[in-house]
Amino acid sequence: MKKLLPLPAVAPAGARLTGPGVMAVLALVAGLPHAAWAQGVTLADAVQSAWLRTAQSVQAAGLTRKAQAERAAADALWAGSPALELGVLRNRQPAMAATRETEVGVAVPMWLPGQRAARQGEVAAGMAAAAAHEAAAKLQVAGLVREAVSDIAVQRAELAAAEAASQEMEALARDVERRVAAGDLARADALAAHAERLAATAAAAQARQALQSAQRRWQALTGLSAVPAPDADVASAPAGEHPALQAAALDVLHARQRLDVTRASRRDAPELLVKVRQEVTAGAPTVNGVGVALRLPFGSAGRNEPLMTAALNDVDVAEAVQRELAQQLEADLATARSAQSAARQQADHQAARAALLRERAVLIEKSFKAGETPLPEMLRAVTAATQAEASVALARAALDQANARLLQAQGVMP
């Protein structure tokens, strides 16, 4: 039978789950280094790859192009597109000399006082809001990527634990079979050991299938086969305003700028008309003329009140959304911090428990070899120790997941 190895000393409760004793537990469970992650791909690379596969990235690019076109329109000299006017009048009455009047004019919409500056401010605020919403959308994609990495980490830990348990039960079953053949144990003990071995093998197969499913979901999300390491410790994360909160604040600014445009646009744009007129009469000299006219539309309550009401309502809605989002993000951050603290304590406690149960299993193994302990108790001790070591790996994965969720709640991009 494979000899049960005692665990090194574990750091006391409250210590960080990064000491050599815990790493030995993880190595014992997994049979490979804990940091079995892809070295050539970073989490930021995975987020960018996932972002480019979303419809939101296409929409964000379209909104950017739209904002650039609106800026070009706001920077134009005229408030709208010029219009061409063309008119021809002929007189063919028999009693009168034939005449023909031709008139060509150009109508140019003009900016109202302060309207162009307000429109430029609105466009600038819209471009900033579009960029902020793109950053917030990327953060949402980063959250999906972080969850996918955490899911794979959990499945890897479960598979490593299941394979370790399967190997241990396999060795135990072989040893029991030898002792049954030697007459030291009854046939019922061999049947019990083989039953436990089959259960451990089935659990390992199920864990392997779950890991493969998680990896397929990862590939569908990012288009990558390599999986990067989880986020670094949250202690080194830079502090800053949440992108979603920035986007909400810029939405408020954009709504206020639209209100300024509405206030500066109390009437339709005035038009400057420049006309050239030519009158040709049979038997008389041709008459040419040039004229300038100004068309000034009047503003009315029927036109302005609905526009002002809609603009004021947009401001109120944007401010309400900003307040609600700030409260929600604050609650999410508090929840994430509490969950991370609990996950760290749980990981420390699981490491200490695994060390105690493994030490107990070693002692019971010696007693079993000496014939002082029956096989069922030996199986229970080995199972409890293996499950406890699996819990250590799962607790570490849960701690990594809690760190990732805390970074997500803080609005930190990978």
Image: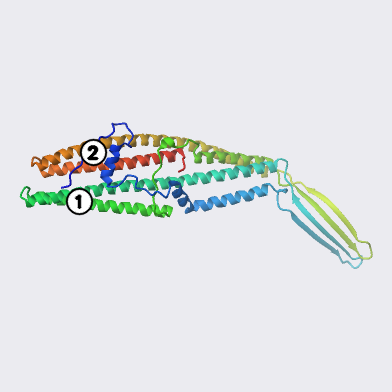
Give the residue displayed 17% in from the left and 39% down from the top: 362
Q: Which mark is residue 243?
A: none
Disc 2 designates what residue?
A: 7
| 193 lies above or below 333 | below
User: Residue 322 in the image: x percent, y percent?
Assistant: 52, 38
Badge 1 or badge 2: first in the primary sequence: 2
The image quadrant where one finds the C terminus is top left
Disc 1 designates what residue?
A: 199
Q: Can residue 265 be spotted in the picture?
A: no
Give the residue displayed 59% in from the left and 44% down from the top: 126
User: Residue 13 in the image: x percent, y percent?
Assistant: 29, 31
Give the residue displayed 72% in from the left and 43% down from the top: 112
Q: CA distance from mark 1 to mark 2?
A: 25 Å
How packed mark 1 is, by other alpha carbons closer than 10 Å (few <14, some 14-19, many 20 or more), is: some
Nearer-the-camera pick, 40 or 354:
40
Nearer-the-camera pick, 41 or 165:
41
What is the three-letter code of the residue carrying label 2? Leu
Regarding mark 2 in the picture, which secondary structure is present there? loop
Q: Are marks 1 and 2 in contact (CB under 8 Å)?
A: no
Give the residue displayed 80% in from the left and 60% down from the top: 87
Q: Is residue 45 left or right of residue 203?
A: right
Regarding mark 1 in the picture, which secondary structure is present there? helix
